[in-house]
Image (cartoon, grey):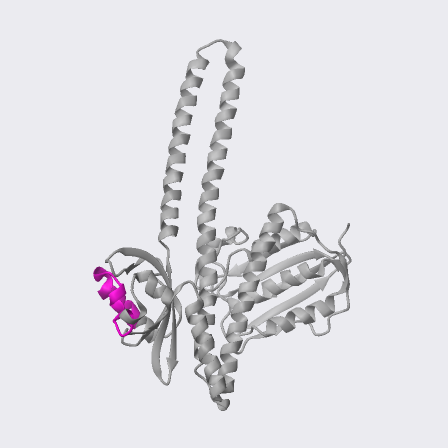
Amino acid sequence: MNNFSFSESRMFSILFNGISEGALVVNQNQIIVELNSSAANMFGYDIKELKGKHINTLIPQRHHQAHDKHVKEFVKKDKKRRMGENRKIFGLKKDNNVFPIEAGLNPFKIDGEKFVMTIITDITKRVENEENIISLNESLEKKVQQRTEQLQHSVDELSELNDLFKDEIMRRKQAEARIKTALQKEKELNELKTKFLSLVSHEFKTPLSGILTSATLASKYTKTEQQDKRDKHLNTIKNKVHYLTSILNDFLSIERLESGKVTYKFDYFSLLNLINEVVYNANVTLKTGQKINYPQDLEEVEMYQDRNVVELILSNLLNNAIKYSKEDTTITLKITQNDKFIHFEISDEGIGIPEKDKEHIFERYFRAENALLNQGTGIGLNIIKVHLENLGGNIYFESLENKGSTFFVKLPIKHED
């Protein structure tokens, strides 16, 4: 037993001090009880200088009152979340320099006492990059305006000349249009890069913080009769790792689809076997009281498609239905067919899609307003739509906010080479 306890504590120490981001733990009185070297270095202290100090030591004076209020509300709700949603937060270094930070909060209890683990990232460079991009965009807009005025002036002068110069005027207008298009694309690319970096940072930080918290708690249960509690936190770690793998696969799929490097592997396979496998895997992620209704007497159908892509499409839609539905709800999978096509319907009783967001739901990185608090990258439905179009199929949906959604997928039974 002692050997086990020692190895668990050592594993926590390695995890806690090995990560590059700052990590610290405060008790319910907001006193720092533990931190790693990354956190100490970030604020310009030695570890021993911060242990036992109030968290306000690391927060600018003008934010103390607001921070104290937010922390008390957070501890009371006892739910993990990002700190500073829709507002900027700042840290205070030992030399009194203030700098922007991003923080993820994870509450936990040990022997009945409440603690909060905070994962902190110094986002000074990201903020500087965002400000540079904003400045660059403003500069680009000014260039467009200046070039437009210059070209318009040239057009006005040329228009006073005879018809010999009409071709030159046309060429200048075409050049103006090309310049505007190029500058607009550059602006959109800069904005997309900023959005992508922010998305990746958040979507990786949340599961990493969960993994670290679960590893911390697992190390506290050293007795044999506490195996079920260890298993619970180990399963959490496995699920978070699976989620990270899923994100990476989505990003790789986007890269392949954009570059045209995606290659489909067509072969014959049993639709019945595929459905049973997809539903079995989805059952593992069901919330308490949720269930999946699907046809138990499905007629055997042999498809000629890329099996992995069909599995990805159905798994993604089922997982979305589970994720955006509450406990004790039903997800329904219906399957019909004719001579040439298979039709799938995936219905849920979830949060639905707001009317104003429906036209954007298949756009890359877009997330509906009522889904922002759920984990997600906003690229899954875009990947599905592109794959279906490449395979000769299509997808559409019907949805009512707070009532649920139904996604309709049509796919050829046999792909025509």
Q: Is residue 14 above or below residue 304?
A: below
Give residue 258's position: percent from left, percent from top: 60, 47
* Numbered marks: total: 0
Seen as rendered, the residue at the extreme bottom is 225
Question: What residue is at 51 percent from the left and 73 percent from the top?
Answer: 237
Give residue 245's position: percent from left, percent from top: 56, 63
Give residue 183's position: percent from left, percent from top: 46, 35
Using the rendered view, name the quadrant where residue 268 is placed. Answer: bottom right
Q: Is residue 400 above or below residue 385?
A: below
| Residue 63 within the magenta-colored segment of the rendering | yes
Question: What residue is at 69 percent from the left and 68 percent from the top?
Answer: 275
Question: What residue is at 35 percent from the left and 76 percent from the top?
Answer: 115
The prevailing secondary structure element of the residues shown in magenta is helix
Identify the magenta region.
50-72
On the picture, is 153 further left or further right than 335? left
Q: Is residue 308 above or below residue 79?
A: above
Residue 368 appearing in the image: no
Question: What residue is at 27 percent from the left and 56 percent from the top?
Answer: 98
